[in-house]
Amino acid sequence: MSISSFFYIIVETFKGLYRNRWMCITSTGVVVVTLLMLGVFMLVNLNISHITETVKEQVEIVVYIDETADQEMLDELGQKLSAHSGVAGIRYVSSEEHMNRLHRQLGGMLEGYDAELDNPLLASYEIRTVVPESVAVLASEFETYPGVSTVFYGQGYVENLFAVTGVVQMVGLALMAGLSITAVFLISHTIKLTVMMRKREISIMKYVGATNWFIRWPFVLEGLLMGFAGAVMPLVALYYLYQFSLEWVSANNLAFLTLLPAWVVTVELARYLVPLGTGLGVLGSVFSMGRFLRV
Amino acid sequence: MIEAKNLSMKYEKGGRYALESASFYIDRGEFVFFVGSSGAGKSTLLKLIIREIRPTDGVLKIFGRDVGRLPRHRLPYLRRNIGMVFQDFRLMEERSVYDNVAFAMVVIGVSRREIRKRVPHVLGLVGLHDKAKTRVCDLSGGEQQRVGLARAIANRPAMIIADEPTGNLDPGTTLDIMNLLRSINLRGTTVLVATHNREIVDRFKKRVLYLENGKLIGDEQKGIYAHVH
């Protein structure tokens, strides 16, 4: 490409943006609105995933040890559980520690109760699993191990939690996919309009011997700039919106909602929205020009 | 320069021939009129020459190359050797005369220095040196066609193709444009003009290819329009 062609392409890109400024503003507006909606869903989904992960990390199996089990059996059980491929980590909790926990939880209600002499609580192994969703399967397996009295993992609650978070994530993904398709449709449609407005110019270029790529470049760069602007604007808006939400959550004492920090969310959104916006702009330009280049 | 052998074109499968089995040869530096009534096949022939369409049958060689088999990516290089002039001028109306002519050079990568040198020269040739900064939409029809001609010769093509170049012009302006085409031809450029303007064809007494219902029915040196019928 010669220097004059390079400058021509750059100058034409900005001239094109200026000449068709209203159409460009409309196209960029479409990208902004679509990516803003997409961003809001992504933001919600990211936080739901984060909260779910946090909750999942707290899901564990408690294997209560039979009171007749001797030290050897206890050690064997500990080794067997640690060696299991589905187990991420285990922790032994003696019956005394259980009693202490109960004391702490119930406070004065256990006043006068002699824990050392008459402790009915069983010692246990508290187990974190590699895959939180596998707790039910693992729990039923651990129940069969020698020396195990009972196994508890929050039966019923955990299954419900996983079912609900699964549905929420699926709905979020479906919405994001739907919005992405809508964005592609709207953007390629609006860019097609800008290309149509300049079809005379394109046909002249074809007749005087311009190559297809020479004709495409200014449109591709325009699409790229519009897509980039269309991605950055919602990103900035979402950053401030999210900051505001974080402040509102902390002001309303909703600390149990463990939300992601604003910069983490912004970086994560930028990773998707910027390539998506610019990609949509470029692809929209390339695809909408096809018909006009066949001269 | 142009060699057509049994050249045929059908726009629709099973439809009628827009051009049927046309064979002719045009040498470098010739001035040729393609004449015939509307639908005779003149525009189809010109479209085939610039490879806007591919022939259904036959062979068409331009500059020694079979354009029917020319890959799509080679098309721009064929067209850089052909200057096109249209009945509707096909100019960028909101831009200046200078920009319209320079545009043809820029898009094929001519240097800015060369453009600055060549555009005034070309505008001088068509008599528009004093209108370089005028917007095309502020020009008369004849002046607009001069801009079209200037754009067509800007890249020094070996051939000029003019499709009804005077169709939208009054008789006086028509003669001006045709004289310009003749002077371009005298400089060695092959000129092909599709027209149904009887006076022009009869006045210029150049080679005439007669087309009727898609068939080439006559080829005369120093022909006159009346021979069509």
Image (cartoon, coloured by chain):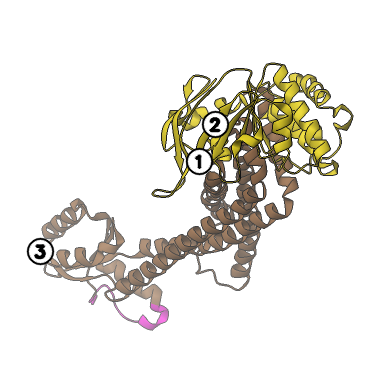
Vertical placement of residue A249 versus A237, above or below = below
- The answer to whether residue B103 of the structure is visible from this angle is no
- Chain of the residue displaying label 2: B
- Chain of the residue displaying label 3: A
Closest to the observer, A253 or B21: B21
Q: Which chain comes out brown in the rendered image? A: A
Residue in the picture at 73% in, 55% down: A22
Q: Residue A144 bears which disc, if any? A: none
Residue in the picture at 65% in, 35% down: B225
| Location of residue B102 in the rendering, given as x and y in whole percent from the top left corner | 74, 29
Magenta residues, dominant SS class: loop
Is disc 3 in contact with disc 1, using a CB cutoff of under 8 Å?
no
Quadrant of the rendered image containing residue B89: top right
Closest to the observer, A59 or B146: B146
Q: Which residue is mark 3?
A: A146
Q: Is residue B6 magenta?
A: no
Closest to the observer, B200 or B136: B200
Q: Which residue is mark 1?
A: B214
Cα distance between the residues tagged 3 and 2: 107 Å
Q: Which chain comes out yellow in the rendered image? A: B
Q: Same chain for labels 2 and 1? Say yes or no.
A: yes
**Which dot, 3 or 2, sits closer to the camera?**
2
Seen from this angle, which residue lies furthest right?
B130
Q: Identify the magenta region.
A: A106-120
Horizontal side, residue A106 vs residue B53: left or right: left
| Amino acid identity at mark 1 | Gly
Q: Which residue is mark 2?
A: B218
Cα distance between the residues tagged 2 and 1: 12 Å
